[in-house]
Image: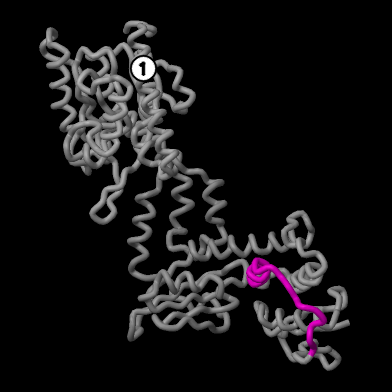
Amino acid sequence: MRIVHIGHETDFSGWRDHARALLGAGIRPEDVVWRVCTEEADLFDVMTRDTGTAPKAKITVPRAFLTDAQMAVCHRDPARFDLLYRLLWRSQDMPGLLANSVDEDVHTLHKLTKAIRRDRHKMHAFVRFREVKGEAEETFVAWFEPEHRITELAAPFFMRRFSNMRWSILTPDCCAHWDRETLTYSEGTTAAQAPDGDELEDLWRGYFRSIFNPARLKVKAMTSEMPKKYWKNLPEADLIEPLIASARALETQMVSAAPTPVKREASYEFSDPCATPADALDTLRREAAGCTLCDHACHATQTVFGEGPADTPLMIVGEQPGDTEDITGRPFTGPAGAVFDEALAGAGLSRDALYLTNAVKHFRFIPKGKTRLHRTPGTAHIDHCRRWLKAERSWIKPRLTLAMGATAIRALHGKTLSVTGAREGFSCFDGGLAFAGLHPAAVLRQTVPEERERAYHTLVSDLARVRQRLEAKENTPA
């Protein structure tokens, strides 16, 4: 029987050196007893650390195992070193062992590493620094009681996050110290060495109280993410239970309070009941120019409203304006608009005879240097802008509609449909008949010439199919 002494509780390098020597000497796992040195070794203990013992064969192990082993040694399970050596021994004859999650040893290793990751996450979340009074330099100290010996695993996170701050994290097992240049460790200590509080904690408690929403309180979920064992070290801990206890009364008070006034909604009623569709569309265009119902409306250059004759039988709906359209104020005038015009000619349609609009009237984008990158509209944006689309359709009354792309389909139908599935037709929110087609921008997104050519022909085919439907009068008049 070999008794092996490890330098300290988280001595991964010591375990690794011993394990290599034992494996090289052919010592089986059941013949090894692993002990952590808390005092000098017994007289009869046999040390196995023998750098002169060469392995009988090359030792191979997946890199992921070393990462997991480094985490597992931080666990408080006293059998962790036995487990790791047993896995190392077995993996030499079973190369795929560590990928077998149903193996009992592998399953146990995964349980240990999962517990360590969770404990490290909790330490990152619940450490609270307090300023130490009387220090020559501003210094902060935190007291924390992790479930496992994870201080050395967790400390680099605080070093990166609070790099300009002098701090110490005290725990019962190990203490971490950062002086703005070097991260060092010392032996564990007690909570008595940590400060009781500082001036900022009242501000923090005030903030915590202000963001508490009793209507969204889920105690079980909260205690799962913030277990009660951590509460005693949190400055807001004295507020948690009273807030939970008063949640029902606060919720009732919120419900009975006066409702928040709704946002302004666009009005489609006109003082002149005899207004022509053209005049009505001009009025709508002026109203839409001041629309701020979407959260991205204030970032766009202007509202890009629809254009075209009010008596056209065909309406074409795109997604949203692009960078060029946002500047010009007209739909389908950018690079995708050039492809669209070419496809219209190929399908035998004239732009002047169509009403062109978009499901969303403002350009949604992400700034990147001097460039504005297109960003797909969200469901809320589509729903907000549908009121303008409804108004346009109520005056134009198209016999047929072509929805180019998924956003246009969502705006017209009210639900998400695939372009392929909607090509044969679907009903609009007002009962009108619509067909789906490829958006011109999809042609531009193709980088392979053959794929771009195929997408372009699909676009032309979609436009031609709608023209043929109109000519054959296969649709039902609105």
Q: Quadrant of the N terminus?
A: bottom right
Q: Position of residue 133 (x, y in %)?
A: 36, 79
Res. 38 image quadrant? bottom right
- Residue 66 drawn in magenta: yes
Q: Position of residue 324 (x, y in %)?
A: 22, 40
Residue at left 47%, top 59%?
237
Q: Position of residue 426 (x, y in %)?
A: 43, 17
Local SS, label 1: helix
- Residue 138 drawn in magenta: no
Residue at left 17%, top 13%?
277
Asked whether, in this view, residue 260 is left or right of residue 452, the answer is left
Which color scheme does this rendered protein use? one colour
Q: Relative to residue 83, is residue 445 depicted above or below?
A: above
Q: Relative to residue 236, is residue 44 depicted above or below?
A: below
Residue extending farthest to the bottom is 43
Give the residue at mark 1.
Answer: 466
In this orientation, which residue lies closer to the viewer: 440 or 22?
440
Residue 206 appears in the figure:
yes
Residue 78 appears in the figure:
no
In this orientation, which residue lies closer to the viewer: 427 or 344?
344
Residue extending farthest to the left is 272
Res. 116 image quadrant? bottom right
Specify start and end residues of the magenta stretch as a single range: 53-71
Question: Is the residue marked by circle 1 packed among few (<14), some (14-19), or many (20+) residues within 10 Å?
Answer: many
Q: Position of residue 363 (x, y in %)?
A: 26, 39
Total labels: the figure holds 1
| Amino acid type for the residue under numbered disc 1 | Val
Asked whether, in this view, residue 3 is left or right of residue 302, the answer is right
In this orientation, which residue lies closer to the viewer: 11 or 57?
57
